[in-house]
């Protein structure tokens, strides 16, 4: 991946990115760092987070499962220690399970809600004091949460995932309402069909790949960098008056009914 961000749009800022070892999170960590931010790049200890960004300037890896009790405090503490504050929280770690409702187990349901919703909520709550402090000093701070086009639509076998992503949208809108008075914006991203670790198995099949590419108006799958650029829009100073917004970044996948 090339470090295309050479404009310093996040110069001097400190960001947390979760799910940063792979896919959308990895690309966003790289782009944020290339744009001048110090990035706390968080992913599970079992992931390659400690080596994924080795040698990349301004990326500080943190091997942590976001669902653990002490994770939010440790992650925010890392931002304060490494960067001296916190400007941007990007809650992106996520998991998906596919099984029709009758075959969807409690464990599958709970895991999706634990990672996709509960962990994001707990990290937002933990980050608010640091974000408030930074917003008071600089005029702004940001939360961006990764939802999905499944925050507004659905597909077969995705009951738990779809419900969890609708919840991410609801959480983001409520946070936007509560935190606006401090100068903190809260927005969420709705990616379409993106080539990442989550979708690799499916998109390795050329037939499945072709179907999803053809569904999009732009006739291709999305890349992690497509998503990173959309997150950068929401994280940048230019987005000062945008809050509670769900940004669809799907190449036109969901235009047609
Ligand atoms: N790929 C797509 O087509 C697509 C579409 C819509 C939404 N999304 C969302 O994008 C986000 C990023 O996913 P991706 O597509 O880049 O997939 P990915 O699997 O490549 O990356 C997800 C990362 O999250 C990490 N993660 C999972 N559970 C974690 C935990 N408990 N603690 C810390 N890290 C954890 C994984 O280790 C992985 O590195 C997810 O929220 C996903 O739901 C993806």
Image (spheres, rainbow, N blue to C red):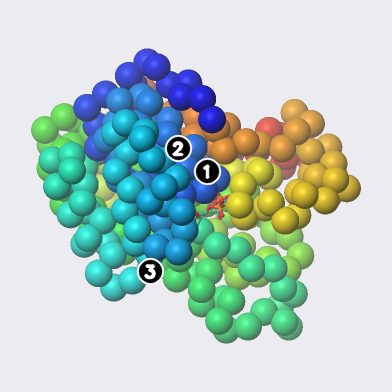
User: Looking at the image, is 223 positioned above or below residue 167?
Assistant: above
What is the quadrant of the N terminus in the image? top right
Quadrant in the rendering for residue 73:
bottom left
Is 171 on the left or on the right of 8, as rendered?
Answer: right
Mark found first going from the N terminus, 3 or 2: 2
Q: Is mark 1 within 8 Å of ligand 1?
A: yes
User: Looking at the image, is 109 positioned above or below residue 235?
Assistant: below
**Mark 2 falls on what kind of element?**
helix
Q: Nearest the camera: 208 or 146?
A: 208
Residue 48: give x, y in percent of width and height: 46, 54
**Residue at the image position 58 percent from the left and 54 percent from the top:** 151
CA–CA distance between discs 2 and 1? 6 Å
The residue beneath circle 3 is: 67
The residue beneath circle 1 is: 24
Residue 250: give x, y in percent of width and height: 65, 38
Q: Which mark is residue 28?
A: 2
Q: Is mark 3 within 8 Å of ligand 1?
A: yes
Q: Are marks 3 and 1 in contact (CB under 8 Å)?
A: no
């Amino acid at each position: 991946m090339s470090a295309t961000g050479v404009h310093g749009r996040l110069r001097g800022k400190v960001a947390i990115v979760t799910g940063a070892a792979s896919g959308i999170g990895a690309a966003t960590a790289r782009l944020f760092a290339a744009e001048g931010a110090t990035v706390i790049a968080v992913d599970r200890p079992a992931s390659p987070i400690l080596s994924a960004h080795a040698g990349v300037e301004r990326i500080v890896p943190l091997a942590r499962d976001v669902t653990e009790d002490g994770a939010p405090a440790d992650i925010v503490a890392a931002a304060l220690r490494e960067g001296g504050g916190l400007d941007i929280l990007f809650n992106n770690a996520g998991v998906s399970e596919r099984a029709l409702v009758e075959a969807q187990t409690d464990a599958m349901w709970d895991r999706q809600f634990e990672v996709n919703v509960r962990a994001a909520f707990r990290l937002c709550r933990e980050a608010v004091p640091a974000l408030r402090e930074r917003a008071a000093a600089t005029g702004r701070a940001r939360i961006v949460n990764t939802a999905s086009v499944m925050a507004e639509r659905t597909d077969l076998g995705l009951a738990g995932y779809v419900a969890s992503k609708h919840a991410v949208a609801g959480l983001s809108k409520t946070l936007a309402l509560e935190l606006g008075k401090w100068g903190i914006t809260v927005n969420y991203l709705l990616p379409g069909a993106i080539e990442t670790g989550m979708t690799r198995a499916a998109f390795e099949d050329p037939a499945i790949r072709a179907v999803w590419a053809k569904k999009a108006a732009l006739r291709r799958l999305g890349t992690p960098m497509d998503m990173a650029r959309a997150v950068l829009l929401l994280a940048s100073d230019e987005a000062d008056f945008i809050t509670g917004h769900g940004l669809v970044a799907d190449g036109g996948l969901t235009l047609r009914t």
